[in-house]
Structures are given as structure tokens and as C-alpha cells.
Amino acid sequence: MSEGKRHNGPNYSLTGVPSRPGLPRGAALQSGLDESRGDLESWPVHPVAQSTSNLSLGQAHRPKSVMHHGKRKPASRANPEKSIIPKPKFLEQLESYLHRELQKLGCTMQGPNLIKLQAYREVFDYLMEDFRTYKPLLSAIKNEYELVILYQQEEIRKLEPLETTVGTLEEECERKIIAMKQEEKTDVHNLQQENKRLCRVIDQANQNKALLQAQVDKMSEQLSVAYKKYRDEADARKLLLSDLNEMRFREKDSSKSKVEEDDDPVLLKLFLNRAQEDLKLAQTRLNEVLADYQDVVPRNEFTTLEQTYLTLQEEHDKLKGDYRTLMQEHNTLLGVHKEVVSQRDKFARESEQMKRSSTPRPDWERCGEHIEGGTERWNQLMEGHTSDEMIDILISELTGTGLEHIQQPEFFEAQGTSEDIPKHLQFDGQVRNRKLTRKDTMLFIEDVWQERQRLRTTETELQAFPDFFFLYLQQRFFDQNQVVEWGYNVHDACTRFHGEDQRIALFGDILSTEVDEEVYHQQEASLKQLSEGFDAVAGKTGEKDVVSKDELSAIIANVFPAKSQAAIDALLKVCEDDQQLSDTSKVNYKKLLAEDASSTAPFLDLLRRQEEAERNEFVSEIVQALKGKSDVTVDELRQAVLAVNPGRSEYEVVRVLMRGFAFTKASELDDCTDAIETSSLVKLLQTGAISRVGRRE
């Protein structure tokens, strides 16, 4: 762009424009105004149809007035075309250049665009180069706009990551909304199903209500008909009475007409009293009839209601039986499911063990050289067993421990939390197996019995033994997991050692309520009495801790008067074998009664088995004395006990009766008139501390 000579007026040119158009001369542009006053041309730009910002270069509208030397003059109406001032050439060139550039760049659409901005920036630069007087101001304005644009672009670049984050969050929120809608759709479907079910129940209830209402309406209608009949009958009865009274009065009037005027007033008073008595009697009779017929129901209606009630009762009994059948099937299926789950877990453990043990087979033949019996016995032991089982057999042979104690699971499967399970076994999940030994189990049981004995001496009312055992575990182990763990381990130990130790077996039976607790205390009392008898005899003879065989036999017969001679001889034989006695040797009764947590004396073991057999024998004799009765009353059981054991005291008889009928107080026997099944009676007696008292007659 260049500037021409000033006396001819300034000329301008644009890059890319072939010709150099000049600005209007003299009167139109007023040369020298921008040097002298700093004013721009006074050409009116307001009549243009659209501004250059809208990129429309159409024809200009005709203005109403034009500026002439800075003053506004009205346009001539005679020749309006001559009054319009033409647009400057430079302005037209700028607009034309801008229009061409925008078309080349393809920016013909409305709206902001950086490419369009570049074209406008070039045109604005041309404009600033031409108007050098305003160039600093225009340049400052442009720079401010450029700085603002750069700042806005920088802010946009900073916000682009946030836009990506917002888009990601929007997608995640959309997924969550879709998932929530899906869940709500499922919940709504379930609620709709429940609503339909409740609607059906309500409809059924409404139908039942309508049926009952119809029955009530029918009964009300029948009652109203009956009441109407009664009222009609009562009214007819009243009319009849009134007719009779009227006829009576007429008869009296006809008789009075024959009597003279001076009739006797006393006679008239008597007639009046008699009439009042008749009226009172009729009123009383009427009231009785009303009272008698007040609650009367028609016979046909009563028959219908009775038949309906019987039908409903039969349906109820049938549904009740179906419910019991379904519950039994349900319980059976639960048991089958539990068994299947147990088998599945067992197979899973076996599979895991097989995976771990799938290594090259060892040379098992070498083990036969180091066990008792040699290779021949070892071959018999390992025949038909897997490698894992042979390891257990080898450990059993080397340690002397039974296989049932070695092959134990690491965890117990809990029995659940239902009410029919003992409190110390109520748990869901797996419980660690401590693999208690016989000694550990017996030490624990002795501690339990010591605490139980302490409570028996200090408290009048005791809890049931399973409840006491659960409370004992809670007081000893504060952690609930420890309580459940010891409860299951003691239960398992009682099961494993049931056939090896009579003390552990008795404790397990008492804990499972299969045997009465008094059996244990009765055994302890008998052993204490036996020990005191030995001490008394040894004190008289002056020999410490020993008695002769005859003295031993006499003491046993004295402490256990119901024991037969054969049982006493068996106990003496055990003593001889245990202490290897000769005919003249004496018995060391301290060793005879000695037992610890790991072992028990053969004498005491046999004595406990004999007591159990004697209890069962006594119960069998009572059953035989009942002579096959299916149900037994209190009196019948009393007669049977006295028939089997005549020398039994009344106190001992009452103990048997209370045990047989599961009473806790003797006064309950006097009020008992019901009979008990013989099978239930036998079970209660066999689990109690019931045996023969005195010698057998």
C-alpha cells in the first residue's frame, strides 16, 4: 500500500488489485481535513443496507438527509438521486477485496471462524496503514482484541481435558442411570407381581366377605320373618284375650242388669281383684313366651350352617395334613441337600489332595522292615489302600495312635442355628478341629464337673446341663468363636472316645440329654462311699491301703446291696488280674480306685458297666410287670415298681414316678390323671438314675 501526491489527493492500492483507484477529489473528500483537524470523511455510512460485519455489499438505501460540510441538510425532493453522496472508492475496494478473500477461503456461512478473522485482520491492517493518524489507537485496540482472543484460546485449551473428563463422567453417569433404571424395572416388576398377588388375595377376601354378608342377610331375613310370625301370633293372642275379656264383660254387664241398684260393693271389689290377678297372670305368661322365643333359630337354617361348618372343618384338616406332608418332604430334601454338599466338599478335598500328592510313588516295601510284624504284615496293611491312606497307616503304626484319630478333617461343618440344636453347637460355617486327645478331653471334662459341683453346693435351682455347659464356655472363653470351637471339639471327642472311656461316654450322653445328670452324681457318691468303706476297714486292721479279698467282697456287697454274687465275683476277678494277686495276697484298694485323665482302672470301668446293666435290667422288670400295657397311669406304675422291688421306700418310689412322668415336683403326681405311653416311659426310666434298692428277694 502507498500514498500518492497530496495536491492531487491521496491514492491507495491493495495487494492483488491491478488498478490504483483514487479517493474522491476536492468537495467530496475535502483535502487536508485529516491533517488539520484529524476528522474522517463525512460520507454517511448509515444508509448502507448491511454493515461489513455481515459481509453484504449490496446497494445502499437512499438516505433521508446527507451531511454537507458537517451540517445536516434535507434531501431534495425534486431530484433525490443527485442528493446521494457516492461511497468512497477505497471503501469499495476494501469490501470487494474482503468479499473475494472470503469466497476463496470458502467462508460464506454465518458464525465465528478463525479463517474469516484472518481476512478481516488483513483488511484492518490496510485500514490502519492508510489512516496513520489513528494508527496507534487502532493498533492498540487491535492488540487488545488479539490478547483477549489469545487468552480465550488458552482458556479453551485448558478446558479441553475437562471436556474429555466431563464426557467420560457423562457416559459413566449414563451407564449408572441405565443400570439403576434396569434395577428399578426389576423391582417394579416384582412389586407389580406382588401387587397382583395381593389384589387376588383381596378379591378372594372380598368374595368371602360377600358370601358371609349374603349368609348374614339371609339369616336376618329369616329372623325377621320368624319375628313377624311371632308378632302376628302375639297380636292374635292379644286379640283373642281382648275378645274373651269383652265377652266376659258383656256377660257381667248382662248379669248386672238383672241385679238391683243397691248391689253389694264388696262383691264388686272381689270381682275387680280377680280381674287384676288374671291380667297379671296373662302378662307374666306373655313375657315368658317372649323370653323363650327370643334366641330361637329355625331348624333348617341350623342344619345348613352345621353342614357348612363340617365341610370347612374337613377341608381345614386336609390342608393341615398336606402342610405336614410338605414340611416332612422339605426337611427330607434339606437333609439330602446337606448330605450332597458334604459329599461334594469331601470329593473336592480328595481331589485337592490328589493334585498335591500326584508325585512319583515312593517305595512302600521299605517300610515293612521298620514296623512290627515285618514285610508280610506291612503288605497286608497296605493292600487296597491309596498312598495317602498308607501314610496314615504308617503314622498309626509308628505312634501307636488309632487311625480314626489320625484321619480327622481339619474343620467341622457347623450344624446351623435352628432352635433344636444345642446352644453350644449353634453356628454357621466351618469350625477348626483341635483334634483333642483322650487326656485333653478328660481334663476339660473334670474341670466342667468341678464347676458343676460347686454350683450344686451354692445354688438351690440349677440350669439344665446343656445350658450350664454353654454358660461355662462363655465364662471361660470370652470370644464367641472360641466358645463354638471348644463346643464342637468336645462334642467330637465325646463321640470318638465313647467306646474307650466310660467317663467320656457318660459326659457326652448327659450333654446330649440322653442320660440324666443324676447318674453321674450317683456314681460319684457310690465311689466315695466305697472309698470310705475301704478306709474304715483298713483303719481297723491297721494295714495301710490294703484289704483282704473277703473284706473287699463284703465292702462291695455293703455299698451295692442289689449287686448279685456273680457281679461281685467278676469284680474280684478283675482285681486279681490287675494286681496279679495270689490266693493269700491282699488288695491295694488305692491302686484299685486310681484313675487319671489318660487312663482308668479296670475295676472302676467294670463297675460302671455293671451299674448301667443293672439300671436297664430294673427297667425291663418294670416293663414286664406292666404286662404289655400300651398306656400307663401313675397308680399302675407305682404297683409295678413295688411288685419288682417290694422293699423300696416311699421316697424311692416317688423318685421313679417323677422320672417316669417327667415331673419336677412330687405334688404334681397327686393331680396327674393322664396316662403315658409305655415306650416314652421306658425311655425316660432308662436314661435316669433308677435302679434296684436293697437286696433282691
Image (cartoon, rainbow, N blue to C red):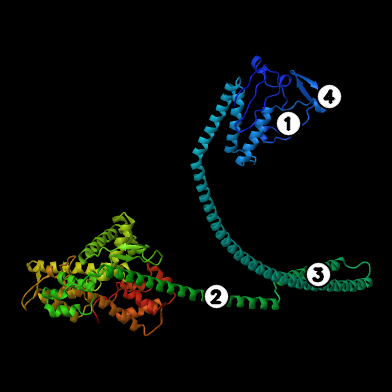
Q: Residue at label 4?
A: 76
Looking at the picture, how far across and down is residue 616, in whole percent?
A: 29, 78
Instruction: Give the vertical position of 48 relative to 507 (above or below).
Output: above
Q: Of marks 2 and 3, which one's residue comes earlier in the chain?
A: 3
Looking at the picture, how far across and down is residue 70, in whole percent?
A: 74, 18
Q: Name the element at disc 1.
A: loop
Say what amino acid the circle numbered 1 marks.
Answer: Val
Q: Are marks 1 and 4 in contact (CB under 8 Å)?
A: no
Looking at the picture, how far across and down is residue 690, in whole percent?
A: 30, 74
Residue 645 in sight in this render: no
- Pick the residue in front: 545 or 405: 405
Q: Of marks 2 and 4, which one's residue comes earlier in the chain?
A: 4
Say what amino acid the circle numbered 2 marks.
Answer: Leu
Looking at the picture, how far across and down is residue 430, in whole percent?
A: 34, 63
Q: Of marks 2 and 1, which one's residue comes earlier in the chain?
A: 1
Q: Which mark is residue 274?
A: 3
Say what amino acid the circle numbered 4 marks.
Answer: Ser
Q: Of marks 3 and 4, which one's residue comes earlier in the chain?
A: 4
